[in-house]
Amino acid sequence: MVDYLSGGIEWRAESAPVAYREALAAQQARLAAIAAGEERELIWLLEHPPVYTGGTSADAAELTDPRFEVVETGRGGRYTYHGPGQRVGYVLLNLARRGRDVRRFVHALEGWAIATLGDFGVEAWAVPERVGIWTRDIDGAEAKIGAIGVRVSRWVTMHGFAVNLDPDLTHFSGIVPCGIADFGVTSMARLGVAVAQPAWDEALRRRAGEFLAALAPSEAE
C-alpha cells in the first residue's frame, strides 16, 4: 500500500516480507535520490525474513549463534535481529529541511514508537544509557520491545526503528541484542496484547504528524 502524508512524504506499507539486502539497497538508492532532490521522502513499513544485522559498533563476540544470514549495515549500533512478527519502520527524511539535528530525530523516533505502543496499552520508555524502547516484561523485569538504529548521509536519514509485535523471541538468542546482555527481549504478544500488522501500521500513521512536528526546530533556535 502506497499513500502520502502531508508535505508529500510517501507512506509505504508492505504486507509481504522483504529481503533485508533488497530493502537496504532500496534505501541507499532512495537516500541518494532524496539528497539530489529527485525523489520524495519516504516512510516504509515492512517485515524481513529472519536476519541478523550489524551496525558500525558491532562486536563479533556478540554474534553468539549466527543461525541466520548476517548482514553488515551502515547504521549506528551493534547487532540486532529482524524477522517475521517484528514491524520495521524505515524513515528517509531530509534533515536539512528540519534543523539538521540528528539527536532530535532519534528522540522523535523513540517518542513515535513509545506513543504508538501506549495506544495499545503497553507502557514503554527510552533509557539514555541504553538505546532502544523498553517496557516491563511479564516477570516485572525491564525488557526491550523495540530497537532504534539510524544512519545520516548528506543530511538524509535511513534505517529507523523496529517493534516486536509477535516475533519468535528465541531468534534473539543468537546475538547479544544491541550489545546489552543484562536485559531480555519481549513483545506485545508476550505481554498479552494481540495486534495485527495493519492495526499497528494505522496507529503509527495516526501519530505521524506528531512525529514530524517533533522534528521542527524550536523558535529559540
Image: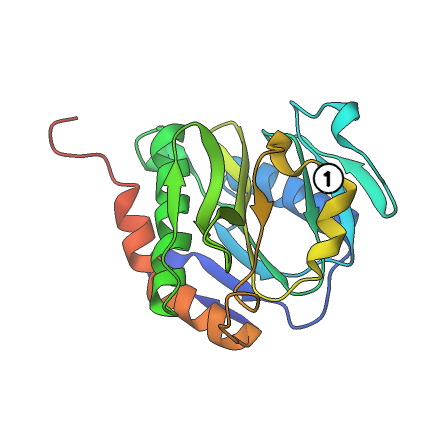
**Residue 5 visible in the shown view:** no
Q: Which residue does the image show at 49% across and 34% down from the upper left?
A: 131
Place residue 63 in its image quadrant: top right
Q: Quadrant of the N terminus?
A: bottom right
Going by the image, does 210 lie left or right of 13? left
Tag count in the figure?
A: 1
Residue with the mark numbered 1: 53
Going by the image, does 7 lie left or right of 186? left
Q: Which residue does the image show at 48% across and 48% down from the upper left?
A: 141
Q: Secondary structure at mark 1?
A: strand
The amino acid type found where label 1 is placed reads Thr
Going by the image, does 74 lie left or right of 95? right
Give the image location of residue 108, x and y in percent.
Answer: 35, 43
Q: Which residue does the image show at 32% across and 37% down from the upper left?
A: 98
Q: Quadrant of the C terminus?
A: top left
Give the image location of residue 104, x and y in percent.
Answer: 33, 34
- Colour mode of the rendering: rainbow
Going by the image, does 69 lie left or right of 205? right
Name the residue nearer the viewer: 64 or 110: 64
Name the residue nearer the viewer: 53 or 7: 53
Give the image location of residue 14, x and y in percent.
Answer: 63, 68
Name the residue nearer the viewer: 53 or 176: 176
Q: Is residue 54 above or below residue 51?
A: above
Q: Is residue 209 above or below residue 3?
A: above
Give the image location of residue 156, x and y in percent.
Answer: 49, 35
Q: Residues within 10 Å of mark 1 (few under 14, many from 20)?
A: many
Residue that sits furthest to the front in the current view = 139
**Residue 113 visible in the shown view:** yes
Q: Is residue 191 above or below residue 155?
A: below
